[in-house]
Amino acid sequence: QVQLVESGGGSVQAGGSLRLSCAASGYAYNRGSMGWFRQAPGKEREGVAVLRGDRFTTYADSVKGRFTISRDNANNTLYLQMNGLKPEDTAMYYCAANYLASTIGTMVRLYDHNYWGQGTQVTVSS
């Protein structure tokens, strides 16, 4: 059974940084993709970053150059380093995993095949 547990959210001022973590169990990361999505109140869930294998990454245009996705294979943990945070980054952030997808676009299209964590809240104040 796949389990994804996020941590690392919090409240920061604009320009600050946070690192989100997603501890994965029961998921063969070398056979699929893992990524981060976010959902702000009243908005749809959107893809933020996806990592396929060890190197293939896709990012939403809104976070390129500020966020970095990575994984510690030894600890089965996915990370999202968020720098230069803006108030519009405020959202609940969810870890996702999918054996069939390889990019943000395909994880969105294959939404029903995603495994999800419970989410961690990120709040950025101006």
Image (cartoon, rainbow, N blue to C red):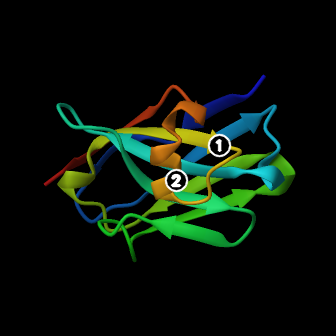
Pick whichever of labels 2 and 1 is earlier in the sequence. Answer: 1
Q: Using the numbered discs, state the Cα–Cα distance from disc 2 to disc 1 in whole angstroms.
A: 9 Å
Q: Please name the amino acid that badge 1 sits on.
A: Asn
Q: Position of 11 compared to 26: left or right?
A: left
Q: Is residue 116 above or below residue 51?
A: above
**Residue lying farthest to the front in this orientation:** 109
Q: Position of 119 compared to 79: left or right?
A: left
**Residue lying farthest to the right in this orientation:** 74
Front residue of 46 and 13: 46
Picture residue at 62% right of the left edge, 31% below the top: 5
Picture residue at 78% right of the left edge, 49% below the top: 29
Front residue of 20 and 56: 56
Q: In which quarter of the image is the C terminus?
A: bottom left
Front residue of 1 and 122: 1
Q: Mark 2 and 1 residues: CB-CB less than 8 Å, in contact?
A: yes
**Residue lying farthest to the left in this orientation:** 126
The image position of residue 117, as x and y in percent, is: 56, 30
Picture residue at 60% right of the left edge, 54% below the top: 79
Picture residue at 74% right of the left edge, 67% below the top: 54
* Residue 116 visible from this viewpoint: no
Q: Quadrant of residue 42?
A: top left
Element class at badge 1: strand
Element class at badge 2: helix
Residue 98 - label = 1
* Residue 21 visible from this viewpoint: yes
The image position of residue 69, as x and y in percent, is: 56, 62
The image position of residue 40, as x and y in percent, is: 25, 38
Task: Give the labeled residue for mark 2.
Answer: 106
Q: Please name the amino acid that badge 2 sits on.
A: Thr
The image position of residue 65, as x and y in percent, is: 40, 77
